[in-house]
Image: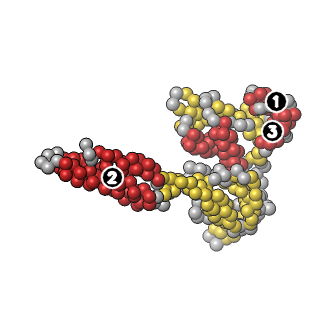
Amino acid sequence: MTAWPRLLAPLTLAALTAGCSGYTQRTHAHTLRFLSTPEDALVELEDGRGRRAVGRTPATTDVEVVSSVYEFNPWSAVWPSLICGGTIAGMVGLAAADTSGGGVLTLGILGGIPCAIGVLGTILSAAADGNVDSVAYKNGPPKLLATLPGHTDNVQLLSSNDPIPTEPIRFELFPKGGGLVTAKREGALLGAAPPTPLVKRVVAVFPVDAKTEMAESTLDSLTDYLVTKLAETGRYRVVPRDELRRRLLEQKKESYDECFDESCRIELGKAVAAELAMSTRLIRVGDECALSCTVFDVRTEATEFGATVRTSCDEARLMDGVDQLIKKLKS
């Protein structure tokens, strides 16, 4: 019995000092680099801090990222030392009280197990010092826009699911309308007429509606991603969402939920001088989800085209569903 007070003190200190090490959040600047073909394109960046111009390519800018880093506290080495010391002291006390030596060896082995575990845990904890568990954009994934007079725009949305880029981000910008196209065949120079410029149709994209429980922030992110990918096709000009909201207020409707049916949205599309109105719905059946998109001709008030894709209901995979939806709309 005389040994237990000696063992109790180090075990108590062990419990108090075991949590000294752990993960901490570190915020630091990460440099994004931008290149374009051709050069001298103006790059703009939009994130939680707002929209700002970066400069003309080649250009760089810093964004704030948050890293979850494991930090080892040297004081954490105290508790395994106390356990070992307390165990040894307790065994010596038992041996002095029990001259026959009965049971002291067994207790010594049992006492050595937590001692060994404590030492091994300290070594592994020290080896993990500085390990990065995750890295994320502090102000949300940036949306990038590259523009150059006489060329098509290029929009890129960085994903929070992908590693933060360390290589330069490249923008490919193509001339609007093009010039004289030439090609060599069997030594002869052939001339071709310039391609017909693509007429971009103006589309009003309404927020993604969910026929299942889904966070509003997720639906907003899906809508932003849908708008970005639609603009990347080079076929459409998208009416800004702020303009749609302004028109809603003018019609004394506080939310898109009050303008859910197609007739209301067609009328709203006319009000913002759009040619097309796009409605997208997220539907869940069992364990699977589907993204269904319908595009209406505002002038004729008839369905222009539509597309549906099946996708995982996992929020991280819904963006893949949007990519598949855009591919169908392009084909």
Q: Name the residue that disc number 1 marks.
A: 253
In the rendered structure, which amino acid carries the disc numbered 3? Leu
The vertical placement of 9 against 187, above or below, is above
State the residue at coordinates (75%, 54%). Answer: 51
Dots 2, 1 in contact, CB < 8 A:
no
How many other residues sit within 10 Å of disc 3, few (<14), some (14-19) or many (≥20)? many
Depth check: 136 or 265 in front?
136
Q: Name the residue that disc number 2 marks.
A: 83
| Disc 2 to disc 1, C-alpha distance | 69 Å
Secondary structure under tag 1 reads loop
Depth check: 1 or 78 in front?
1
Q: Residue furthest left?
A: 100
Depth check: 7 or 315 in front?
7
| Disc 3 to disc 1, C-alpha distance | 11 Å
How many other residues sit within 10 Å of disc 2, few (<14), some (14-19) or many (≥20)? many
Decide if residue 49 is in sight here.
Answer: yes
Depth check: 253 or 84 in front?
84
Q: Earlier in the sequence, mark 2 or mark 3?
A: 2
State the residue at coordinates (12%, 48%). Answer: 100
State the residue at coordinates (17%, 45%). Answer: 103
Q: Quadrant of residue 296?
A: top right
